[in-house]
Image (cartoon, coloured by chain):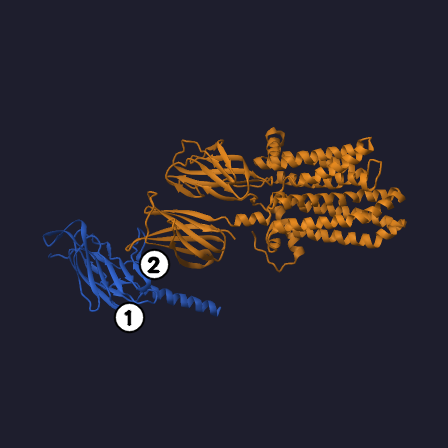
Amino acid sequence: MLKRTLVTAAALVLGAGTAFAHVSLQVKEAPVGSSYRAIFQVPHGCEGKPTNVVRVQIPEGVIAVKPQPKAGWTLEKVRGAYAKSYDYYGTPTSEGVKEIVWSGGTLGDDEYDEFVLRVYLTKDLKAGDTLYFPVVQECPDGVAERWIELPAAGQSADDLELPAPGVKLLEATSGH
Amino acid sequence: MRNRNPGRSGILAALTGILWCCLTAAAMAHAALTGAVPSDGAVVAAPPKTLSLSFSEPVSPLVLKLVLPDGRARALDTFVLRDRTLEITPPADLGTGTHVLTWRVVSEDGHPVGGSTIFSIGAPSGAPQAAANAVDWPVRGALWLARIALYAGLFFGIGGVFAVRWLIADDGDGPAPVRAATLLGLLATVLSLGLQGLDALGAPLSGLLDLAAWKAGLATSFGATVVVLAAAFCLAVLATRSRSPAMRRGASMVALLAGSGALALSGHASAAAPQWLMRPAVFVHALTIAIWIGALLPLASALRRDGEAGRKALGRFSRLIPLCVGLLVLAGIVLAVVQVGKPAALLSTAYGNVLLAKIALLFLLFALVAVNRWRLTGPAAKGEAKAVRRLCRAIAVESLIVLAVFAVAATWRFTPPPRALAVAAAEPASIHIHSDKAMAEVTVTPGGAGPVDISAVILSAEFEPLAAKEVTFVLSNPQAGVEPMRRKTELQADGSWRAAGVVIPLAGRWQLRVDVLISDFELVRLQGEIDIRS
């Protein structure tokens, strides 16, 4: 009985630990038609190994992406065409950054860090939806943690093993 | 297979074994299906040009049907047999949806086996019902009784006639039970042919009136046994009735050899490899049983009737039978070793349980035989009336035990030997998992609990090969409380993804998820269920 209790307790603790260990966005809500500071919180490495690479995929409808450089990390901006043209304060924008890669750094498994982007959330995004930024953490020996799962209809991010970090979209604030 | 506690005593296991194999409802494979194209559960893009079924032993088809998505069944008449593979040409106008290929074949051991495989064209439609392999108890019971009567006829009847002519060297017609056994055996042998046909076609007992059942029975390998055995019974009758002494002795000898040989023409012991060993072993086993058991009734009769001739016969019997029993046991051991394979199968399979029950009865029989030989044979040979009476009574009891042995051995007709089960156990389990983004054909080899290899072929929803970056299997069994186990795979030269040495701890229905990483940021999860045998 004691053994079972211990196992259950351990499972609860470990389970809870996993739940808090996802890569997440610090700011959980943002209005469309405005700039958004996407702060990715990386709480651990992959299976005990340090993180060397962090890749963030920029979802469609997110433009004017500017990553914040980090000391000790090399920045790479992968550019490409958007699915459609977006309006950026009156300027039509049909291509731009589609993926950001921070590489060459070392973030220990027992360390925490934040990776920051400044983006513009176009008005084409629908308020009420959650916008997901798939993130891949790469570690030595080809090991990776992929926070890339998007909930299907009727699912919540809590149901997923590897949920992509998301931000809840709000109505555009007036005055813009 | 049921789990059995090895701690149980052998006798108890043997007795439950008899009960179990009498009650067991699962139709078990003798020739096992080892593969099908399209594989069971497969989804194919276009109607297949050929359907193929591969078996563990050479087979011939009895019934081949294709159940269409609308529930209609079409007989499949065009097929070719290539070694152990049956290649069937399906109707050209197959539509989309799920099809059930229902088959019933007979293997070289003469036992019919049936089953179904399911495949879908384009996409699965509904949940097709595989035809259940129900056991027809009246037919099974009749087969069992006929088999006991057949053994009694061969061993007490033909064996008895041989003993009367050669051992007792008697001019009479032999004891009445021997003559009755011969006629009973002839009747049972002929009837077995029809019953075998019923079993082959899956027809009820009333089908005996139909010629088709008899034809089907004759077409199985058991047909040859029936023909030769029936001829042997006729010769035994001739050996009783003929007026020529040479004919009487000759016919009884040929009947004995032919009758024993007939058993080696069919049955799963005869069909087993190595053939050069197994068929002669069956023959020797049957022949020595016939000589020994056949001598019992005529000997008792001679002892009671005519002291002098009886005592001489008893002397010959005592010299001949030890050699005979030695060969009998030797052949029996050879057969058992090949058929059972591993000692554990004695407890874990119905076939093994029957063997244990048979061995238990044989120990009883041999104990009685030993008492007769060392306590009674000497005094009886000297003509002590009391010993003769006791010996005759002992022979009657021996005969009853022998009948019980026949009854037990006759249940083997319905239990596949562990050798065949081992082939069936090696069969893979497979599933097809389908989503709107991708599909996976997953094969678990062997499809039973324990260490297995899991491999998957990943295709796009349009049946094109899908270049995945990584494939991971996640197995879980929520009912048994087994949490997800993830196993990484490696890409093989043939394009499949394989995880070797995965241990599936329990039999039952498992959740199998295939995580397919298509690109760095795109993951497809395919979730399905797979049945793992014990």
Residue at image coords 88%, 52%: B379
Left or right for B268, reference A24? right
Left or right for B27, reference B395? left
Residue B94 % position (x, y): 41, 33
Left or right for B487, reference B377? left
**Same subunit: marks 1 and 2:** yes
Q: Which residue is mark 2?
A: A161
Instruction: State the residue in front, B264 or A69.
Output: B264
- Regarding residue B477, the answer to whether it shows in the image is no
Residue at image coords 28%, 65%: A51
The chain letter corresponding to blue is: A
In the rendered structure, which amino acid carries the disc numbered 1?
A: Glu
The chain letter corresponding to orange is: B
Residue B117 % position (x, y): 47, 41
Q: Earlier in the sequence, mark 1 or mark 2?
A: 1
Instruction: State the residue in front, B154 or B184.
Output: B154
Residue A111: assigned label: 1
Rendered position, B127 above or below A73: above
Instruction: State the residue in front, B386 or B488.
Output: B488
Q: Residues within 10 Å of mark 1 (few under 14, many from 20)?
A: few
Judged by depth in the image, the label closer to the viewer, 1 or 2, is: 1
Instruction: State the residue in front, A174 or B447.
Output: B447
Write down the chain letter for disc 2: A
